[in-house]
Image (cartoon, rainbow, N blue to C red):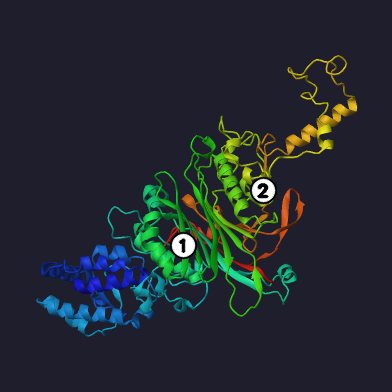
Amino acid sequence: MTDAFFTCQKNVLLAKSPSAQIEGVFAATTGRSVPEEQEALLQQWLEEGVGNLPASERVPSVRKVSVTLTSDWLEGSELLMTSLSDLNTSPEVTRCADQQLSELNTLASSELQDHAVAELARLPAEETVTVAGSVPRAAVVPQTDHQAAGCAGINVEVLNDDPAVLAWSLACDAETVPPVLSASPIQDAVPFYPVSTEVPYHEILWRDWEDLSVQPCVLEQVSKSTPLFEFRVMSYNILAQDLVEQGLDLYVHCHPDILNWNYRLPNLLQEIQHWDPDVLCLQEVQENHYWEQLEPTFKEMGFACFYKRRTGTKTDGCAVCYKHSRFQLISLSPIEYFRPGLDILNRDNVGLVLLLQPVLPEGLGLKAVSPLCVANTHVLFNPRRGDIKLAQVALLLAEIDKIARTTEGSYYPVILCGDLNSVPDSPLYKFIRNGELSYHGMPAWKVSGQEDFSQQLYSRKLLAPLWPSSLGVTDKCQYVTMCQPKKLGRREYSRDFLLQFRFCDVACERPPQLVLLEGVTDVKPVASARERSAVTAVLKRHNSLSFLGKQCSGVIQHGLNLTSVYSHFLPHRGRPEVTTMPMGLGATVDYIFYSAEPVENKAGRRLYKDGTLKLLGRLSLLSEDVLLMANGLPNPFCSSDHLCLLASFGLEISSL
């Protein structure tokens, strides 16, 4: 009988986990049961499943076989449910039920056992396996051979019911599931009260695909004769497992099973493969999981992958993956924000900047498309240290400026993804979107807008310059070496240029070694008031053009012209969008920014229109009240504490 339990458990977890490592786990667990344990399990079933039931319920009216399963089986399958109708057509569960009936008939030795087996023998073999005294549930069965073969073999065609309903969604028969689930059998576990399964998770967490290509503003800019190179970009903070275990207090609302990496990994992979992005930007990617599981799987899915672990002792980092059939790598630049000796950059966050060349399909003739710069980062979380966040973003923008700059001085299209740990309309968000921020005297906590510390007696304030000139980054978020003109031999100055300085203080001082000649070198030049004002204006203009990166004005700028894919508000619900939900409070901290053309500044806010890079669609986000209905994040449907962001873009294809 335990072999039957083993088979059911294996079917459940294989359907949820395409990883081949699960096979080894189950191989190690087989053969541990002994006849005494089998008899004890049978006796427990007889006592709890039959002896404790009323006479009218000893033969289930819905024709189901009731058995008592061990707690370790429940730990792996408590939340893995699917439609009961799918189970009836499953050969795996049919064999499981046949084997259970065979074991029960073999082990029956008493009149009570004979009576129970006789009752069970009259039932058909294709029955639902349920837990005695709990809600009837059905094991998830692999739908295709690809699902059991590996993560890369998940057949997306199986998920064709609706583009927003994924295979990892939980669905139960409403007639057989009560509105409240039974308590978990795991001892010392936090009580788990998920949403009533009368309303499936996939309906609560429904996310629409918003087609923006049909909007008039886009149709005006895209001519019917202008072909586009279309591609999808996903940004996703997948929640590193080490961070889960270090901060379990943040996830007291979650059942321990759904926090297990062996449960979360298949969910995450299925979600990524369902939406099928061409460029994938991930944050909080644990290093050992990346090298052992994620990278091999992504490569089988057709991705080329690059990873950068956080510096210091941190075990997670950022990854950027792209379909090598759609893009070719031109350059790669990992970024470390930690700089020894600088208090403003003393944290271990990192980023990645790639320059990719789109691969055009054959048969287009002499066509060309612009390279694409893709950046991914995870900025410091600490709400009190907005100064560090701002410096990290400035470093990232300087790197993008270097990678995306063309020989003519313009920029290739840029897509910036990441978890910026800053809310919309915060100073940091406005800096990225509007290209300018006056920060001098600003409280550091105010930069990200995550929390309000205005009631504190002391708060750190931002002072100019924000970072020292030794960092080599100007107040325009450019590297100094990118700003300085190239020195080609001796620098030459015109006579008119030098004459502008003939009355400056240095020019009016007689050098000590100069021979004194009466009437020639003993007279100090005297300038008129007009000449003195002209010299002063020249010196001021010269100082303002200095490439030393001094931020004495307390203003930083950048020239990338970035705008957000999302509007951060759901007009049909009248509520703000959220991308994460720490401690039950929804917030937007994840973004996809992209290059656009500015059209005007209105009330301090820069307005944009699509340029070479056009936004064609996006996956809608959810509001806080919807996520509360699903018991927050993570939940059995979404295996991260962040929602994924997904957008579709088009690059204009031009003739050579």
Instruction: Examine the rendering and report whether any part of residue 141 can be seen.
Output: yes
Q: Taking 182 as reference, is 611 left or right? A: right
Q: Taking 492 as reference, is 234 left or right? A: left
Q: Position of residue 230 (x, y in %)?
A: 61, 71
Give the structural element (helix, strand or loop) at label 2.
Answer: loop
Work out how far the residue at label 1 is from the one at label 2, CA to CA, in angstroms: 29 Å
Q: Depth check: 128 or 582 in front? A: 582
Residue at 90%, 28% (x, y): give it: 530
Badge 2: how crowded within 10 Å, few (<14), some, or many (20+)?
Answer: many
Which comes sooner in the sequence, label 1 or label 2?
Answer: 1
Q: Depth check: 386 or 391 in front? A: 391
Q: Position of residue 471 (x, y in %)?
A: 57, 39
Q: Amino acid at mark 2?
A: His
Q: Which residue is mark 2?
A: 558
Give the structural element (helix, strand or loop) at label 1.
Answer: strand
Classify 640 as above or below 348. below
Quadrant of the image occupied by residue 550: top right
Badge 1: how crowded within 10 Å, few (<14), some, or many (20+)?
Answer: many
Q: Which residue is mark 1?
A: 305
Instruction: Examine the rendering and report whether any part of residue 645 can be seen.
Output: no
